[in-house]
Image (cartoon, rainbow, N blue to C red):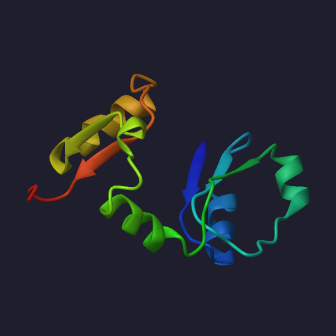
Amino acid sequence: MPMWPSRSSAQAAFDVASRSLRSGGTVVLVGLAPRLVIDALAFVNDELTVRASVGYRDCHGELIAMVDRGELDLTPFTTDVVDLADGPEVLTRMAAGEARGLKTLVRCGTAP
């Protein structure tokens, strides 16, 4: 597998992701992990890469409240809003490099 997104901060999830990669592959950390142990020899020998996302701890409630009060406008960061049924097509376009937007929001239910 060329890339494995690890969405868990558990060591076991990272280990499985690392062992599942082919030579030259990348583990993408999506989430917060206070500490992960990396088998440096395996990463060097197999030319593996680790990439990490930006995460923020315990601030989502405050940010959601700011959006709700109109103090934070996220419109400039939102490129598109799609229905859940269109999600697979959007992901396919993103994987093919055809989607160049900053953020695409997926509408999971009917709008109020």
Q: Is residue 22 above or below residue 10?
A: above
Who's the residue at 41% across and 53% down the image?
72
Point out the residue furthest to the top here.
98
Q: Where is residue 95 in the image (x, y as percent from the top left)?
A: 44, 33
Quadrant of the rendered image containing residue 99: top left
Q: State the quadrant of the C terminus.
A: bottom left
Quadrant of the rendered image containing residue 100: top left
Who's the residue at 58% across and 65% down the image?
31
Q: In this view, does 10 lie above or below 65?
A: below
Q: Position of residue 68 (x, y in %)?
A: 31, 63
Horizontal side, residue 39 vs residue 90: left or right:
right
Q: Can residue 82 be seen in this view?
A: yes
Q: Position of residue 67 (x, y in %)?
A: 36, 59
Q: Is residue 100 above or below residue 19?
A: above
Front residue of this view, candidates 68 and 58: 68
Who's the residue at 63% across and 77% down the image?
10
Count numbered badges in the picture: 0
Front residue of this view, candidates 95 and 104: 104
Q: Can residue 1 be seen in this view?
A: no
Front residue of this view, candidates 102 and 31: 102
Who's the residue at 27% across and 42% down the image?
88
